[in-house]
Image (spheres, rainbow, N blue to C red):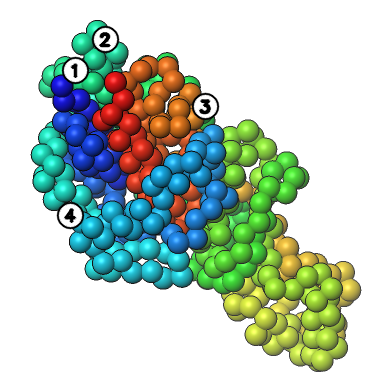
Amino acid sequence: MIRTVAVIGGGAAGMMAAVQAARAGARVTIYERNDRIGKKILSTGNGKCNFSNEKMDISCYHGSGRDLIPVLYETFGVAETKRFFEDLGMRIKEVNGYLYPASGQASTVLDLFRYELERLSVQIHTGQQVTAIRPSNNGIMVKTMQHEKYYGAAILTCGGQAAPGTGSDGAGFKLAGQLGHRILPVVPALTALRCEGTYYKQVAGVRCDAKITLYAAGDKICEERGELQLTDYGISGIPVFQISRHAAYALREQKHTTVKISFLPDDDEDACEKFWQERWERKAEQTMEVFLTGVVNKKINQLLLSLAGIRGSEKAGEVTGKMRQKLQSLYRSWEVTVTATNPFTQAQVSAGGVDCAQVAYNLASRIVPGVYFAGEILDVDGICGGYNLQWAFSSGTIAGRAAACEM
Ligand SMILES: Cc1cc2nc3c(=O)[nH]c(=O)nc-3n(C[C@H](O)[C@H](O)[C@H](O)COP(=O)(O)OP(=O)(O)OC[C@H]3O[C@@H](n4cnc5c(N)ncnc54)[C@H](O)[C@@H]3O)c2cc1C
């Protein structure tokens, strides 16, 4: 008898799960609440879809499913993902390890999936939100506003809560919760941080190389280096995105959350001291504005001067030792207080979700036989650089194949 499989959600993980289940011989139906599948993919990688990364390591992932990564990726990792897309006809472009379709268009990924789903005769029900899933004697019941149908297996790929405009608004967590699955706290990740203070407007738009270190209740949590972007409400850019999930959890636990920013990221304490000492001696007769020109972006110089309580018209030689120390310390470690992350609407992924302790290595539910999970609905979140789509494709493959074959 042909196995029937329902895939709930037509995102990256859902489309991959459907393709793999159909290739393994199952009769597959996708349920997608939007009027079309794959909406989120179109906005990934600024429309270019950074779908994976050659530099793959477990340290690029967080969450209770982190330990699944080496096992799953051994079966379907970066090499297999590249081969999968190449076989469908994609030429791949690599930039510093980041992988993209060479067309420069995220729509290529979606089109290739659409053609393959059609070739495999996968049924696609768009505009159908699944409102309940229940195990029964006839199989797994999938209920929508339109009908109730029974399947041999159901794969939940409803995504998380990030970018809800694309369809993933946390509805999948409710479905999983109804089945008895534990949902670990869900927070925005890969997003900007809102900070205390009214002075951000004067530096908004500045981008600079920086090292940023996150602290929660005084404890160092993590450190990142890269291009910092200052916005009118706080800090953004890749290094901020990378630490944002940790900041979100710290804030959720109501811990005092701060970020120390070093604008001289290459220099250790001694090198900084030497740099400033030489400068104070060499430029003592110049006004502070001239003294600082060339250290970093002019707007940052001006902001740090005012935070140190120094007027630009003062001569460097006249500035008191205490003020100098303050200024030097601001360049090396400007501490800002984080008040919030940006909301889910402005986050690329959500951290948290279905607890992977209740999911087997083939992504089958340990609670309800016949139910599987893949993608962002699971408590796995990757860093920037193609790691989240790779997770969607790897987990979608494993769940799709297992759902098609397990009886
Ligand atoms: C702006 C942006 C840029 C990004 N860029 C990148 C990038 O370059 N590289 C990268 O690796 N990652 C990127 N990501 C993250 C990546 O897109 C996601 O992690 C990935 O798409 C998640 O796939 P998914 O299939 O698990 O979930 P989703 O893509 O969220 O798909 C879930 C689908 O399920 C549907 N659905 C939900 N509930 C129901 C229901 N009850 N019934 C029926 N359908 C339902 C939704 O409508 C949605 O279509 C980006 C994300 C955003 C928002």
Q: CB at mark 3 closer than 8 A to ligand 1?
A: no
Residue 362 drawn at (x, y percent) = 40, 32
Q: Residues within 10 Å of mark 2 (few under 14, many from 20)?
A: few
Real-space Cα separation, disc 3 to disc 4, in angstroms: 35 Å
At x 31%, y 66%, the residue is: 92
Q: Which residue is mark 4?
A: 111
Is residue 284 shown to the viewer in this render?
no
Real-space Cα separation, disc 2 to disc 3, in angstroms: 24 Å
Which residue type does callout 3 highlight? Ala
At x 63%, y 39%, the residue is: 250
* Label 4 element class: helix
| Nearer-N-terminus badge (1/2) | 2
Real-space Cα separation, disc 1 to disc 2, in angstroms: 8 Å
Which residue type does callout 2 highlight? Ser
Residue 363 drawn at (x, y percent) = 40, 31
Q: Which residue is mark 3?
A: 357
Q: Quadrant of residue 314?
A: bottom right
Q: Residues within 10 Å of mark 1 (few under 14, many from 20)?
A: many
Is residue 252 shown to the viewer in this render?
yes
Task: Point out the residue furthest to the front here.
Answer: 1
* Label 3 element class: helix
At x 70%, y 62%, the residue is: 334
| Nearer-N-terminus badge (1/4) | 4
Whether label 1 touches label 2, CB < 8 Å: yes
Q: Residues within 10 Å of mark 4 (few under 14, many from 20)?
A: few
Residue 150, disc: 1
Real-space Cα separation, disc 3 to disc 1, in angstroms: 27 Å
Q: Which residue is mark 2?
A: 136
Which residue type does callout 1 highlight? Tyr
Which residue type does callout 4 highlight? Asp
Whether label 1 touches label 4, CB < 8 Å: no
